[in-house]
Amino acid sequence: PPLRWVLLEGGAPIPSDALQTGTEVDNEELYSVRAWYKGGVHPGKAGEHLQDGRASISYGGLEHPVSTFEILIGDSSYARWIDVTSTVSESLSQNRRPIYPIEAGREATGEPLFVAQAQYDMGWHPGKAALHDDHCCVGYGGGEVWIRSFRIL
């Protein structure tokens, strides 16, 4: 497949074909990841410069470091960002052609979670968005930030 998830454990380097889905204010690269947490699989971010395992997810108002995770890799020409102006489901239904966002995980309830990206603190940060939410969640500075202007992959 053109895009896929690959397991990384114990400080393994980020693969050279990881799909860059964000940048810090200083242009450090960020990548989309997903990790198992509290009965679900939650999207988050990774970067060689990040501490505590190089990856984190946001959940319950906090940013949680993870050392075992899957990272999104593949050919970026198969991916496109879609602006979300209301909820994910409404934004998808407004397009003329069918759009299939990348399902990156699920809440413990089974609700799908998608790869999201939002601008925050002068960077573009990967995170997660649920189908019926009007915001995405991004782990930042130890917390979970809700951002209403965002995109999904």
Image (cartoon, rainbow, N blue to C red):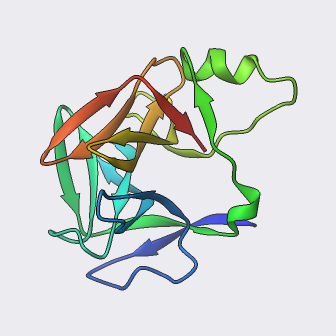
> Whole-percent x and y of residue 129?
46, 32
Number of marks in picture: 0
- Which residue appears farthest toward the right when viewing the image? 97
Above or below for 48 versus 120: below
> Whole-percent x and y of residue 146?
30, 28
Above or below for 149 versus 19: above
As drawn, is 63 to the left or to the right of 30? left
Whether residue 38 is visible:
no
Name the residue at 32% across, 58% down.
Answer: 24
- Name the image quarter holding residue 65: bottom left
Whether residue 103 is visible:
yes
> Whole-percent x and y of residue 144?
22, 37
Name the residue at 34% across, 64% down.
Answer: 46
Name the residue at 18% across, 51% down.
Answer: 64
> Whole-percent x and y of residue 108?
37, 34
As drawn, is 1 to the left or to the right of 86? right
Q: Quadrant of the C terminus?
A: top right
Above or below for 92 versus 144: above
As drawn, is 107 to the left or to the right of 3? left
Name the residue at 24% across, 38% down.
Answer: 59
Is 42 or 63 nearer to us in this picture? Answer: 63
